């Protein structure tokens, strides 16, 4: 990923006007990522209580949280995602506090009926893993 895309949050696949739902926010998240997404979309992130269709999803995930709970969260978040928009799990990088085991997100995604991509660096401390429903095109 080039630095320009990272600086503008374009690597997430979100667009101007998109409504992005954020799950499992806590005070340890990278506010820079949140701000970049909001600048790119021109919209504030909505929280997990928002129950209408959204254009994209980010889930903040940390080690110590139950893998089954992540699967459940993925299913719940996908239920409000319109038109199979961009769906991301953000997790601390290996070696950082809260970094999950390498296969945690992949296992939870598989249980939820999703494919998980290879992690991408989205900030100094966080990786992003894009999820797609089984059978969905990689170009979406």
Image (cartoon, grey):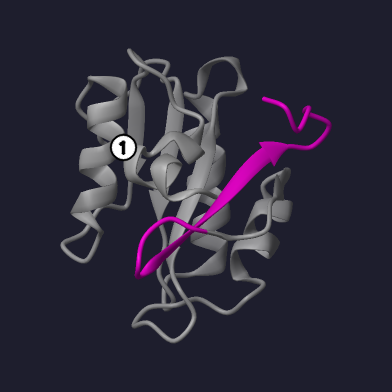
Q: Position of residue 117 (x, y in %)?
A: 68, 52
- Secondary structure of the residue carrying tag 1 is loop
> Image quadrant for the C terminus?
top right
Quadrant of the rendered image containing residue 23? top left
Q: Position of residue 65 (x, y in %)?
A: 42, 71
The residue carrying pointer 1 sits among few (fewer than 14), some (14 to 19) or many (20 or more) residues within 10 Å by Cα, namely: some
Which residue: 33% across, 45% down?
7
Q: Is residue 84 left or right of residue 58?
A: right
**Is residue 129 within the magenta segment?**
yes
Q: Position of residue 40 (x, y in %)?
A: 30, 27
Q: Which residues are magenta?
A: 121-140
Which residue: 23% across, 20% down?
42
- Asked if residue 108 shows in the view, the reply is yes
> Closer to the camera, 14 or 68?
14
Q: Is residue 90 left or right of residue 111?
A: left
Location of residue 23 with respect to 136 vertically, above or below:
below
Quadrant of the rendered image containing residue 138? top right
Which residue: 52% across, 16% down?
82
Location of residue 133 with respect to 7 vertically, above or below:
above
Farthest right residue in view: 135
Numbered marks: total: 1
Q: Position of residue 12 (x, y in %)?
A: 48, 38
Which residue: 37% across, 78% down?
98
Farthest left residue in view: 27
Location of residue 47 with respect to 90 vertically, above or below:
above
**Is residue 74 within the magenta segment?**
no
Q: Which residue is mark 1?
A: 48
- Asked if residue 46 shows in the view, the reply is no
């Amino acid at each position: 990923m080039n630095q320009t895309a990272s600086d503008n949050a374009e690597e997430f696949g979100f667009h101007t006007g998109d409504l992005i739902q954020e799950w499992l926010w806590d005070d340890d998240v990278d506010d820079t990522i949140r701000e970049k997404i909001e600048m790119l979309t021109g919209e504030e992130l909505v929280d997990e209580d928002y129950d209408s269709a959204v254009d994209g999803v980010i889930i903040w995930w940390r080690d110590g949280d139950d893998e089954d709970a992540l699967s459940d969260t993925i299913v719940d978040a996908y239920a409000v995602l319109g038109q199979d928009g961009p769906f991301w799990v953000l997790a601390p990088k290996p070696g950082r506090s809260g970094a999950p085991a390498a296969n945690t997100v992949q296992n939870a995604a598989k249980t939820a009926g999703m494919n998980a991509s290879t992690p991408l660096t989205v900030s100094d401390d966080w990786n992003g893993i894009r999820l797609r429903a089984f059978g969905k095109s990689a170009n979406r």
